[in-house]
Image (tube, rainbow, N blue to C red):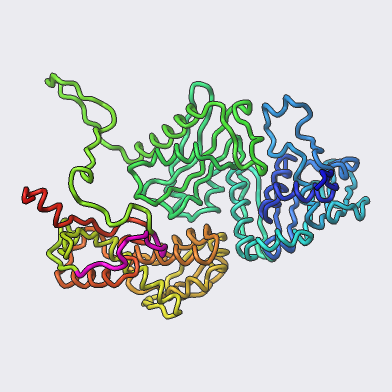
Amino acid sequence: MPIRVLSPTVAAKIAAGEVVEHPASVVKELVENSLDAGATHITVEVQGGGIDLIHVTDDGEGIPVLDLELALERHATSKISHESDLQSITSMGFRGEALPSIAAVSRMVLTSRVRGTDQGAYVRVRGSIMERKGAVGCPEGTSVTIQDLFANIPARRKFLRSAAAEAGRIHTIVTQLALAHPHVRFQLVVNGKESFASPGSGNIRDALAVVYAAETVDAMLEVSATDAEGRHAWGYVSPPSIHRANRSAINFYVNRRWIQSRLLLQAVEEAYKGLLMEGRHPVVAMHVDLDPAEVDVNVHPAKREVRFHNEGALFSLLQRAVRETLVAQSPVPLLAPSASSSTPLRWGPAPREENRQEQLPWRRLIPPGEQAHGQERSAGMPATLPALRVLGQASSTYIIAEGPGGVYLIDQHAAHERVRYEKVTQQARERQPEVQGLLEPQAVELQPAQIQTLEEWKETLASYGFQGEPFGESTYLLRGVPNGLKDARPEGLLGELLDLLSQARDPAQANDSVAASIACHSAVRAGDTLSHEEMVALVRQLEGAESPHTCPHGRPTMLHLSANSLEREFGRR
């Protein structure tokens, strides 16, 4: 096949695919243009999850009439002029790709009026083709209207999520930008109703107050630290007592730009090490201000990732700043050497104990993490457990049992999680959940993003036993929950599930997340003393499970000490 130059139309659509992934990408690019224009009030209106309509207006400096058409040309920008400018980028945008890329896959109307002028102008574009332009009366600032997004790229439309899910993505983008720019007043209107509004006071805590629940914001801790080179880390983090089921509430900003960064995430997680339960994550809104020359923002098509020139210094600054804040909030007494002691204390990591798994002949029946949720078991693994005879309980956590192959130590929580997971999954599949009605309906305050998630996954939640209905703009009245929950606050579980569902890629992942979480919250705990009858009943249920060797999260339910190993340990063979 001969090599040929692509037509401008095809090239524009390919380029748009890198910049415009979904409606939220459009909102991000347009709002960042507004921020670069010095706007102090930005309004985002969407309909049909942004697929039908996106309308962004601002009170920025506006686009001169003569530049309006030029703004739709690829690589036309007012942000940079020379190659050297790439070494110290301070604006949100700089490539000149956003507007032409969006125009290539939609119907666009761009209207603008420069501050201090009497009249504005507009251009109307469909799929990069100019349809109309002219003078128009309009407020100072810029307005961009996008309709029929991806109408000329059916394949891209096919992979969009539901309107509610896309609206949730847009809400997330707007809240991230509001936390990055607390001096700007943001307003988000979804299908004619205000979904989010920030005060624009300049105080990040005021912005946090409209993003997260009041009890979360009230408890958050202020962080501020500067290193010798002038790098400044500041923001707010939650105390260890407040945590989430996923990382969706962890936000990082570098020079006011929201980014995804493994480096910064690792620094924060290291700061919380030993303070949070495994699988739980804090609420974080951390800014890092540094010399623009120290960060390369031109490494990702959507500018979500950056590259730092001195990663080690940045890691140390953030980790130390967050850790010291957490320790100061809950100080841990430090041991001091006695004046009469002749041997100085050694400060540093505690010496590691030898791996007892290697010393003792206990073995897992499945490698850790190999089988989770409903995945198929490894080849050669027994499908069922042998009949076991319960001998007793150790540490109110482990059931000791004997079987044909030796002795078994069963983690009672992991085992019950597996049993509960398979039971609630079957009930949900048959749409016959066991429901525990609440004596008094509980009013649960939800954030706008959680409301969008609830709307998208309400049928899934109902199939597991959640019953209730909306009550006002931001309240959900909870009337029933899955039977057997051991938590005193079922509304907390609902919030956790909504956080998990917001990250679900498909119904299968959504069902796994809900079932595993319900199983965890309804299983017996480590430390619960069980009667002999209760232990026998649990072991019998585990014997009947389809995948008895792991809990839904992949941890082993038991360890096995074979009869041959016992004989060797006691010198009988």
Above or below residue 487? Residue 173 is: above
| Chain part drawn in magenta | 372-387
Q: Position of residue 194 (x, y in %)?
A: 65, 61
Horizontal side, residue 548 vs residue 445: left or right: left
Instruction: For residue 488, say whether it is visible.
Output: no
Which residue corresponds to the image point at 48% horizontal and 50% vertical from the top-left?
247
Which residue corresponds to the image point at 70% horizontal and 47% vertical from the top-left?
18
Q: Position of residue 55 (x, y in %)?
A: 75, 56
Instruction: For residue 314, say whether it is visible.
Output: yes
Above or below residue 243? Residue 487 is: below
Horizontal side, residue 81 vs residue 245: left or right: right
Q: Across the whole image, how many numbered discs are drawn on residues?
A: 0
The dominant secondary structure in magenta is: loop
Q: Quadrant of residue 63?
A: top right
Q: Position of residue 389 (x, y in %)?
A: 15, 68
Which residue corresponds to the image point at 52% horizontal and 30% vertical from the top-left?
232
Which residue corresponds to the image point at 81% horizontal and 42% vertical from the top-left?
74
- In terms of depth relative to the viewer, which is nearer, 359 or 307? 359
Above or below residue 139? Residue 428 is: below
Q: Quadrant of residue 493?
A: bottom left
Is 316 contained in the magenta span? no
Q: Position of residue 491 (x, y in %)?
A: 42, 65
Horizontal side, residue 396 vs residue 200: left or right: left
Q: Quadrant of residue 254?
A: top right
